[in-house]
Image (cartoon, rainbow, N blue to C red):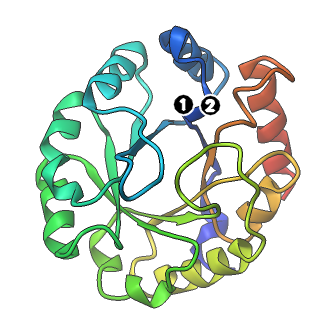
Amino acid sequence: MGSRMNRPTQIAPSILTADFGRLAAEVAAAEAGGADAIHLDVMDGRFAPNITFGPAVVAAVRAATTLPLDVHLMVEEPERYLAAFAQAGATGITVHLEATRHLHRTVQHIVESGCRAGIALNPASPIECLREISPFVDLVLVMSVNPGYGGQQFIETSTSKLRRVRKLLDEFNPTCDLEVDGGVGPHNIADVARNGANVIVVGSAVYNGDGTVAENLALLRKAADAR
């Protein structure tokens, strides 16, 4: 099963489905409920068909929590914004390999900014694209929905993709984290963990009307531990 079995599962709530009118409280609730990080989905309306927020919101979240901030840039030419998000308090910055022309240079700039470097793959992107860049990154993110909106259904072939990415990482960068984002909830969190994901982004499974943030996180943690 590779090195992944030694990794504790980290749960990173995405604020995309949180109540932005009380964002600081929503983030604090996630921290109090046992979240391992906060995931921030930045979209520019070009790379992904939605517009979310920029560095100012990241700075506001930074002021509300001591948790790591996992900033996911779903934007064209992300290299233009790296310094701003690093200064806003990002712990890690993930860019899409489909969105930047000079990926290695972009990864270098993330590292030079003092952040952990991540690479994201869209659902249809082949994992072979990771082979040359994987030794230089701290995290690979497999998108299990198409970028743009929260609340989408998990693409079932993503579990196989996670397994194949983990195998590639075990060869070229065994310490690299493998993250999954999109459509993960109590019904499938154990499955994605079994298939190699050790960082799991959850949005509507945490911020919903079915339970408190703490209750939802406890349910997810229990399900993940059942793997």
Residue at 18% over, 48% down: 82
Query: Which residue bears the numbered disc 2?
Result: 17
The answer to which image quadrant residue 7 occupies is bottom right
Q: How many marks?
A: 2
The x and y percentages for residue 24 are 48, 12
> Does residue 56 appear to the left or right of 37 in the view shown?
left
Depth check: 32 or 79 in front? Answer: 79
Q: Residues within 10 Å of mark 1 (few under 14, many from 20)?
A: many
Between 12 and 181, the residue placed more toward the observer is 181
Image disc number at residue 15: 1
| Residue 194 in the image: above or below residue 151 | below
Q: Position of residue 118 (x, y in %)?
A: 36, 60
Q: For the point 81% across and 64% down, which residue is it?
A: 191
Helix, strand or loop for disc 2: helix
Determine whether, in the image, residue 88 is placed left or right of residue 36. Answer: left
Q: Residues within 10 Å of mark 2 (few under 14, many from 20)?
A: some
The answer to whether marks 2 and 1 mark residues whose Cβ atoms lie closer than 8 Å is yes
Residue 53, horizontal then vertical, whole percent: 37, 32
Compared to residue 129, the image places residue 60 above or below, namely above
Q: Quadrant of the N terminus?
A: bottom right
Q: Residue at x 65, y 51 (%)?
A: 9
The vertical placement of 224 against 132, above or below, is above
| Residue in the foreground of this view, choosing between 125 and 86 | 125
User: What secondary structure is marked by label 1?
Assistant: helix
Residue type at the position of mark 1: Ile
Q: Residue visible at 38% across and 88% down? A: 131
The CA distance from mark 2 to mark 1 is: 5 Å
Given residues 202 and 175, the one toward you in this image is 202
Q: Amino acid at mark 2?
A: Thr
